[in-house]
Image: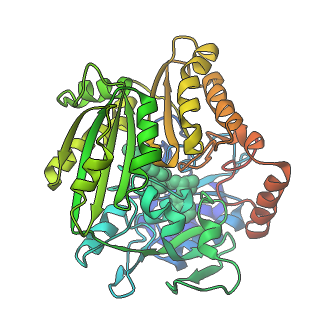
Amino acid sequence: MSTPPSGPSGLLGDLQEVVGPAHLLTGEDLLASYTTDWTGRYSGTALAVLRPVDAAEVAGVLEVAARHGAAVVPQGGNTGLVGGSVPRARLAGGRPQLVLSTRRLTGGLELDRSSRLLEAGAGTTLAEAARAARHAGLHPGIDLAARESATLGGMVATNAGGLQAVRYGPMRARLAGVEAVLADGTVAARLSGLAKDSVGWDLGALLSGSEGTLAVVTRVALRLEATPVHRVAALVALDEVSSAVELVTGPLRRLASLEAAELTLEAGMSLVCETAGLAPPPGAGGAGAWLTVEAAADDDPTDELARALADPRVLETAVAGDAAGRGRLWAYRERHTEAVSRLGIPHKLDVSVRPGRLAALLARLPDEVEKRAPGARIVVFGHLAEGNLHVNVLGPPLEDDAADDAVLRLVLELGGSISAEHGVGVAKTPWLRLARSAAELEVMRRVRAALDPGGVLNPGVLEPT
Ligand SMILES: Cc1cc2nc3c(=O)[nH]c(=O)nc-3n(C[C@H](O)[C@H](O)[C@H](O)COP(=O)(O)OP(=O)(O)OC[C@H]3O[C@@H](n4cnc5c(N)ncnc54)[C@H](O)[C@@H]3O)c2cc1C
């Protein structure tokens, strides 16, 4: 699998001693899938990819990297959308860069049914964790379309949100503990799984959203939820986007069974139908917006969902209670990311505002983008109940960030966040100073310097430029 050690004075040789020759990868072909991100927008060169199998090997890799002055990019499933999971040419300051892949950190999956907890290696994918939980009548309370590749460690590192955050919160809220390795090789773990524990700082909370800059997460304890007996999905066609916002912030938000409320618009719907060969959705031709809604409860929630959707602004609704039918309805929403990528590499902006300001954001977005990037194509979709929109801008060259700037400044003007759930990575660093005060950035800098004084972990990520 790997070529013999070479390169800067003994670095590869020392790394090979830690992970073994089969798990030190070098050479362009072997490294290709680790050095370019899912979007295709971000890539760089790595001296090697390391595939440690446990926390001790992770500690060994970090210790060797620090000793040889190398930078380390932690990588899980490489489904991140902000360029934080791959090496970057300029940002490591000329140091050799290593990718530390966590995909072999999958050992020791444990399920505690009575405490509703799952503990697993950080390289375990969300889908694997969900399958293990399902056997016990439980589920992780977090779901995203990249579930087959996204890892638990990557989801902690980005504080992933996803489709069910409206009910169960983002990854930070799902965490019951972590084990992590600091840049100097210290292994810190708090995996007690306790519902209440106030002894000092919460390691998991500190690492949620840290994007591989503070430590490498090696093990994750997740809170699980009981799987509801009944589940129903609806694809709802509405006259216009403001109706979708009002429905979600009004009657749908009051449903205790609401598990997802996702927005799609005409531009995205036609694109998905065209590229994925899907039949026209309900309301095609007349609708201005669609909601994909899912409700789940032990008592069948179909009637209460129907009551919440009994609104003159609803043009047509398709409902499904069985898994295959729900999958067909969800395809219209879930295939958006893939459909957009087929048009080229988009400017991807994952933003949030308070739900009450969504209508203003959606109304002003097209004009603000048009002013700065005339003729650009915009595809918007997202997790409407949390005020989280994914704004994809196609057309402007990737190095031209005028459209990004227009969208992010508008969001900030409305009191929103420049990253709702994907993180900052390298994609959003130019706007960090607008999004956080100098004092907040100083706190981040000091915490990072304390945990990683040599700047080994993910240089350039989550750092203001
Ligand atoms: C089709 C598609 C749909 C998506 N939908 C959603 C969605 O609905 N909601 C959402 O929030 N995201 C979504 N994403 C983005 C992505 O799946 C998440 O950001 C996910 O959490 C990344 O996990 P990963 O294992 O792929 O991490 P990677 O992409 O490998 O890494 C992401 C970041 O985490 C760091 N990292 C990874 N593993 C570790 C670790 N063990 N320790 C420390 N740092 C680590 C990396 O350095 C990088 O900065 C989607 C992506 C795709 C492609």
- Position of the C terminus, as image quadrant, is top right
Q: Position of residue 3 (x, y in %)?
A: 44, 56
Across and down, in percent, residue 355 comes to: 54, 44
Is residue 22 or residue 321 the one in the foreground?
321
Left or right for 6, reference 130: right
Up the image or down, 83 lies above or below 208; here it is above
Name the quadrant of the N terminus.
bottom left
405 lies above or below 162: above
Out of 397 and 281, give the one closest to the viewer.
281
Instruction: Using the image as rendered, state which of residue 138 and residue 213 is in the foreground.
Output: 138
Q: How is the image coloured?
A: rainbow
In this view, 59 is above or below 400: below
> Which residue is drawn at the image coordinates 30% and 56% (left, top)?
295
The residue at 38%/62% (across/down) is 256
Residue shown at the point (52%, 11%) measured from the top left: 375
Q: Answer with the quarter of the image where residue 90 lies.
A: top right
Count of picture labels: 0
Q: From this viewpoint, is residue 3 visible?
A: no
Residue 77 visible to an observer of this rendering: yes
Task: Please identify the quarter of the rendering in which residue 199 is found.
Answer: bottom right
> x and y percent of residue 175 in the render?
50, 72
Q: Residue furthest top?
A: 375
Q: Is residue 105 left or right of residue 297?
A: right
Q: Residue at x 43, y 52 (%)?
A: 253
Image coordinates for residue 198, horizontal then vertical, percent = 65, 85
